[in-house]
Amino acid sequence: MYTTYESIQWRNNWDCGLIPKSSEVPEELPKPEFMPTKLIRTSDMQVVQGSQVNEGYCALSYSWNQTGDILYDKTTQKTTHIDKGKHKIIRPTYYNYKKEDVRNRGNSFSSCGTITTQHVQFQDIIQQICQDFNIKYIWFDQLCINQNDKKEKQREIHNMHRIYENAYCTIALVPEFYVSVMDWLDDKKNSFKEIGRGDNYHIAQEKITQDSQWFKRLWTLEETLYSRRLLIVGQNAHIWKSNVRDLFSKKFHLYSESFESIMVRFVLYYAHMRTSTKDHDRVFALTNIFPDIMEKINVDYNQPLEDLMVQFYGLLAMKDISLLLFGKHSSYISMGNIRNSNGDFTEEYHVPIQKFNLPSWTGVNGEYIRIEDGLTTSFQNYSIIGKTMQVTCSGITNGNNSLIDNCEFLHLQYKDLPPIPDNNQGYCLGVSVRLLGQETTQTIILKDEEYRLFSDQKGEDILDLHWISKRLQTLSKFMKIEKKSFRWHLGGVIVDDELAISFNLTENVDLSAQYVILFGISFTPGPHFDITYCSYPVITNQNCNEGYYKAIGTCTIEYYGNIFSNCNIPQHTYLIQ
């Protein structure tokens, strides 16, 4: 794939719409404490030693797919990069721009003369960008790393996070970022024409995170997270990002509570939907985000891929057991939507991580929970041995009784439920439950579905018996439900000694399988969050006579008071694969 770059770069100005580039990198950049081994002097694109450069530098972030033809040999599993010089630089021979005119005309400019197109190599595109934005030195992996020198490649991969962390800014090349601009033709007639077939600036900006190759690649995730600031350069527009967190969902807490380390869950949420040219880079790109793990990983593209991935996820799990906090696919459905031959979205979607045969505790079958409150746990009684995670903790399960209890709710009828009050207020169903081997009951509210009955309606008009049956079947896999204890709770309001429970599972409940809430692994919000709930991993044993379990999602319990405080829940050792 080849890239097109236009040397007139537009940016958004709140006063007057789009204006030509007026934001450059400062003339003199302070030299950081760390300097890369090599840098590119952009005046002649020559490699120089970083130690000989007495000023700061910028770093380049881009997708290899957009640098030329990428050939993949299935036999050797090696890729070959060929640049046939089909990249394009588009330059106007002259243009007349007056700031006061733009205020009156909006997204417009006066172009005079002709536009020239030059076919170039990829590094010529980079040189032109650096000239346009006043960048004297840049770190560019294609030229700064000898791809045929194994030792040099290993050394530089280990330094990648330092390279981006110490750069003045990272230049993110996103050719898909392309805006529509108006060309002013006649001042007297106030006539103009649209140049290009780009998008409105704000729509084009959204496509950076929705459709661009750059946002779908694994290496660029690490490069972005360690960057101080980003200069996103598109085909004919650019944007500065002084806070890289703006590129990611505001519903996903980026850093740990101490704001010193990036959260594992956050990284894997995005990483599992990203791709790499070489499968081994799924590990090498991510280990740079966690330098303490990088020190334990051997950068060798010849080692067995599956062993490498299991080792990496094992180290991640020992660093942060929140790897278990995932649920069913939600955002991934739209993020991984597949287009048909006409370019229209289909109902199918693709999750790149699922091509690998990984243990369930890696989250390979799910999507990490996106929440703002940075759930954490103090639980440490676990270990990783190869593909097996061993945890010893208390667990909530209905054991072998679950099949009998579950069948009671297969054909739930309206007569099994109490009438809903018809006072135009919302109600949630509540039930009494008992844990296995316990006598004390606990009230559970199914808070994720609320029913509101108006005076001209009947209960059967609004009740979703199928949904209620499914929820009761799931709940009965973990605790005994007192069938005659059903009652409606106003607005799902929870009082002391009542709980609201919800499940986020990657698969439907199997009536014959055993399920366990790992009650001893309690994830709670930070103390500065006024939220009272806990989340717990959920595991299943499809073959009850075998010892291995599968991680399938999470259970969240909202409460006011204590959770099962009068129950003695025994501890067990669970082997999860």
Image (cartoon, grey):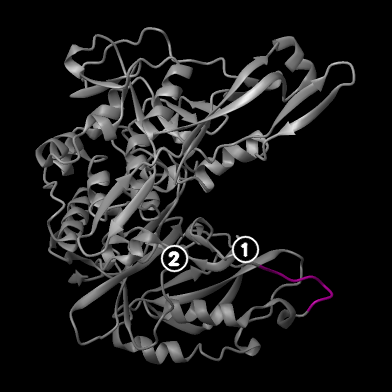
Badge number at residue 282:
none
Which quarter shows the C terminus? bottom left
Which of marks 1 and 2 precedes in the sequence?
2
Quadrant of the rendered structure where residue 573 is?
bottom left
According to the image, label 2 marks what residue?
A: 328
In percent of width and height, residue 276 lies at 33, 51
At 9% from the left and 38% from the top, the residue drawn is 151
At 44% from the left and 17% from the top, the residue drawn is 131
* Mark count: 2
* Circles 2 and 1: CB atoms closer than 8 Å: no
According to the image, label 1 marks what residue?
A: 342
Q: Is residue 450 left or right of residue 161?
A: right
Q: Amino acid at mark 2?
A: Lys
The front one of 21 and 497 is 21
At 67% from the left and 40% from the top, the residue drawn is 197
Residue 13 seen in the current view? no
The front one of 219 and 50 is 50
Rounded to the nearest whole Å, what is the CA distance between mark 2 and mark 1?
29 Å
Q: Amino acid at mark 1?
A: Asn
Residue 456 part of the magenta-drawn span: yes
Which structural element holds mark 1?
A: loop
- Magenta-drawn segment: 451-457
Whether residue 81 is situated above or below residue 478 in the rendered picture: above
Quadrant of the rendered structure where residue 413 is?
bottom right
Residue 242 part of the magenta-drawn span: no
User: Taken as a whole, is the magenta stretch helix, strand or loop?
Assistant: loop
Whether residue 568 is situated above or below residue 98 in the rendered picture: below
